[in-house]
């Protein structure tokens, strides 16, 4: 899954990484030991063990109106903290399925539902325990640049494919963020911002079927598979470069962080939401037989039935 695709100057990038000194790798290997003992047990009981805290004043705001709507006073950002957490979603069954034809994130039910359920259970508990504090939860459509904030909070580094790379689960994580006026102790990365990057081995660039990580004019298959309307012949040919008919995982699969997490035994999720209702092989027949409710719970539903139906015919 690639959610963010942007142009960048690759020579500058390699210049930056060549300047990185040896860092305390053990920091990332053990993960952030979050001091927010009143908040994190809720996450840990649910299999979410990688989390960290950053003051809002150190986050890049992308959609400040979301926080204003949630009742936060943005004129005092120092009084707002963000608890960032990485939710592993990959299962062995999906990862190793020989017939897999949708991106690994789409083989389980839509992760937006997971976060809705999580925050629906968590926020009332938090408000009851801390009635003077304000809380709001976001995932994906977030007020901040979540990847940069998670790296700054020490959850991992940013990969050349623009995803957060964690030692524990590689990039196969969804990011969530809890905003609160409760005073929390920050857990900052030991790396300065310009060094919160992977080592730049380039394996993802070489594995990318379209070259879009080094050529801003080339399309990302993840975005292309979600495009509405008819595809031209060239687009159809591009989509057929991998067996996946929704999304693309090639850059994440090639990344040495993924092999390392698998070897370490921490790549896979233990969260029931992501291990149930798996559909690693989607057929036209299976799609036809889904009820409206069943279809609405799949990650490809947000674009309607037409794009996924069209892709399955390729
Ligand atoms: S490998 Fe390339 S096309 Fe596939 S998700 Fe990554 S950037 Fe997109
Ligand atoms: S494959 Fe290499 S360059 Fe790409 S994200 Fe992983 S570590 Fe970074």
Image (cartoon, grey):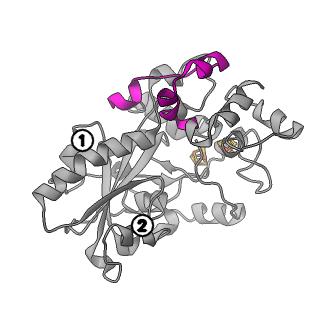
How many numbered marks, from 0 up?
2
User: Which-is-in-front pick, marks 2 and 1?
Assistant: 2
Q: Is residue 214 magenta?
A: no
The answer to which quarter of the image holds residue 287 is: top right
Mark 1: few/some/many CA within 10 Å (<14, 14-19, 20+)? few
Numbered badge on residue 44: 1
**Is residue 17 at least partly visible in the picture?**
yes
251 in relation to 242, above or below: below
In the depicted view, which residue is nearer to us: 243 or 295?
295
Label 1 CB less than 8 angstroms from ligand 2: no
Q: Is residue 293 magenta?
A: yes
Q: Earlier in the sequence, mark 2 or mark 1?
A: 1
User: Residue at point 33% right, 31% down?
Assistant: 271
Tell me the element at label 2. helix
Farthest right residue?
233
242 left or right, relative to 115: right
The residue at which mark 2 appears reads as 66
169 in relation to 96, above or below: below
In the depicted view, which residue is nearer to us: 147 or 158?
147
Q: Position of residue 104 (x, y in %)?
A: 54, 31
Q: Position of residue 130 (x, y in %)?
A: 13, 61
191 in relation to 92, above or below: below
Mark 2: few/some/many CA within 10 Å (<14, 14-19, 20+)? some
- How far, Cα to Cα, is label 2 from label 1? 27 Å
Residue segment shown in magenta = 271-300
Farthest front residue?
292
308 left or right, relative to 115: right
Q: In what quadrant of the picture does the C terminus appear?
A: top right
């Amino acid at each position: 899954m690639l959610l963010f695709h942007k142009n960048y100057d690759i020579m500058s990038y390699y210049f930056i990484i060549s300047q990185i000194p040896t860092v305390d790798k053990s920091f990332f290997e053990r993960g952030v030991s979050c001091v927010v003992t009143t908040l994190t047990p809720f996450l840990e009981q649910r299999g979410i063990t990688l989390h960290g805290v950053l003051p809002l004043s150190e986050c890049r705001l992308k959609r400040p109106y979301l926080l204003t709507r949630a009742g936060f006073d943005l004129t005092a950002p120092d009084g707002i903290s963000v608890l960032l957490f990485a939710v592993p979603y990959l299962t062995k069954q999906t990862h190793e399925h020989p017939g897999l034809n949708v991106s690994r994130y789409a083989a389980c039910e839509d992760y937006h539902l997971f976060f809705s359920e999580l925050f629906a259970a968590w926020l009332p508990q938090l408000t009851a325990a801390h009635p003077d504090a304000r809380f709001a939860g976001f995932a994906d459509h977030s007020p901040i640049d979540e990847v940069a904030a998670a790296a700054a909070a020490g959850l991992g580094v940013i990969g050349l494919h623009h995803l957060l790379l964690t030692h524990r689960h590689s990039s196969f994580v969804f990011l969530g963020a809890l905003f609160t006026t409760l005073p929390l102790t920050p857990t900052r990365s030991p790396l300065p911002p310009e060094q919160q990057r992977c080592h730049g081995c380039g394996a993802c660039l070489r594995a990318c079927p379209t070259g879009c990580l080094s050529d801003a004019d080339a399309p990302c298959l993840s975005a292309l598979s979600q495009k509405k309307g008819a595809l031209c012949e060239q687009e159809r040919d591009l989509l057929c470069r991998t067996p996946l008919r929704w999304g693309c995982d090639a850059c994440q699969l090639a990344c040495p962080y993924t092999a390392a997490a698998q070897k370490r035994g921490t790549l896979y999720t233990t969260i029931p939401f992501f291990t149930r209702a798996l559909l690693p092989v989607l057929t036209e027949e299976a799609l036809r037989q889904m009820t409206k409710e069943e279809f609405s719970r799949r990650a490809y539903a947000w674009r309607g039935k037409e794009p996924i139906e069209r892709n399955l015919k390729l």
